[in-house]
Image: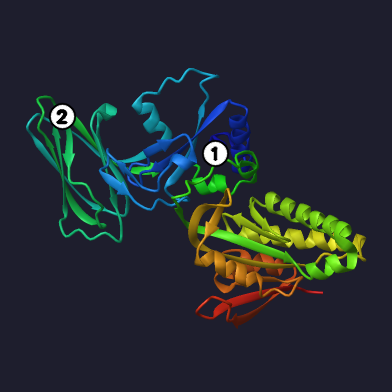
Amino acid sequence: MAREWGLPPKETLGAFLIGTRQGIFDLEWSIRCPSCFGPADVQEELAALKNHAHCAGCRVDIDNAALDSEVEVCFKVGGSVRPDEPPHFTEIIKAWVTFDFLQKKEVAPGSKWVYDADIPAGPYKVFTDGFRARAAFLVEAAAKTPDKEIRFDLKENGLEWHAGARAPGRYAIRFRNSTASPVNFNFARALEAPWVSGLDVASNQLFRDMFSGELISADASFSVKNIVLLFTDIRGSTDLYERRGDARAYALVKEHFRILFESVRRHNGAVVKTIGDAVMASFLTPTDAMAAIFDAHDRFEIFNERSSENPIVIKAGVHGGACLAVTLNDALDYFGRMVNLAARIQGESRGGDIVVSRTLHGSAGVGKMASDLGWSASVKTAGLKGIEDEVGLVVLTRGR
């Protein structure tokens, strides 16, 4: 909808989340088949969704589903607004997939058709007119398939084929019509329509604020292929309480939270949790994470000019990569080596600077953004507590 109507995706997702809270929409979680892009399992609550599923139509097993690539969030009009009348299958197909048609052929009863073609990596579909019979398969660079034939046999009870991923290459794709009627075989490459992943939702602050009860089952976890984490802390927070007393120090800490939370939200992030005075926030892209912490530093600088007797100086670290999405302390959280590393990187900050992993600093747009905003970069290697190997870091400091 955002693409069709030219609307900003974040605000559109927020509107649907608000609509769900108002009862206009119902929220559904599904495991998305990587072959046909359809739902292999659908649940009304995240806690009921398992990290594995089987797509019967494609004969594909999905194991260790990733929150950012195999968990899909869908919104449907609530039953109180419109009776639940399932759409026809062709309408569903139109909604979640489009096709690049490669070949179409009418095959007479008992006859065969062979289509020779170079097949690059991607998802492919074979179906008859009206989708009365259909199959899907993946072509992946990592697959190993010495057999360069793919066979599809249409029988009265459906389409038979050998499931499994294939390697890119030239194939003889063989079609047989074993029915008593002529049939049109369609061979097409599937093109993904825009969709909302579980990580898109989990990294949306509105979702975390309004749907805090939507949690992963305590005995389950979902992999995350890539997420960016920001950790911050107040420099000298213990001394702050000693100098200012509990009441005044707490007021400053609350103001610090307000500034950070607004910067995170403004730049498409979500606050995962606070730990004392520390903040952990998640972002979908490195540039959003960096924009948020740059913005926060600007706002703290303005605050400190107005409150010179009570300056707030933050320590910040940013890193990204793969991890696990879990439920910890009744909240959606992230777990794993990457998370530990991000927290340790923040520990290298001295305050007023930003420490990022060298890999994240090398991400598209990050270095230029820092330079354009007047931040200078220095490279170092550090041994971090609990991390076996030394880590390459970039320390960003604001030029004067």
Q: Depth-wise, is mark 2 or mark 1 nearer the camera?
A: 2
Residue at label 2? 157
Kind of residue indicated by mark 1: Arg
Mark closest to the chain's N terminus, 2 or 1? 1
Can residue 363 be spotted in the picture?
no
Amino acid on which the number 2 mark rests in the picture:
Asn
Q: Say whether residue 106 is visible.
A: yes
The disc at residue 392 is none
Quick one: SS at disc 2?
Answer: loop
Q: Position of residue 145 (x, y in %)?
A: 20, 58
Q: Residues within 10 Å of mark 1 (few under 14, many from 20)?
A: few
Residue matched to label 1: 3
Which residue extends farthest top? Answer: 83
Can you say which quadrant of the picture contains the N terminus?
top right
Q: Residue 312 at x, y = what percent?
A: 82, 64
Work out whether residue 167 or residue 43 is closer to the camera in this orientation and state it. Answer: 43
Tell me which corner region of the image, top left, top right, bottom left or bottom right, holds residue 382: bottom right
Residue 90 pos. (x, y %): 35, 27
Mark 2 packing: few (<14 Cα in 10 Å), some, or many (20+)?
A: few
Residue at 74% over, 51% down: 262
User: At numbered mark 1, what does the secondary structure look like: helix, strand or loop?
Assistant: helix
- Pointers 2 and 1 in contact (C-beta within 8 Å): no
The image quarter in which residue 128 lies: top left
Up the image or down, 340 lies above or below 279; here it is below
- The percent position of residue 82, horizontal first and vertical second, equals 51, 18
Q: Is residue 281 left or right of residue 335?
A: right
Q: Residue at x 57, y 78 (%)?
A: 392
Q: CA distance from mark 2 to mark 1?
A: 39 Å
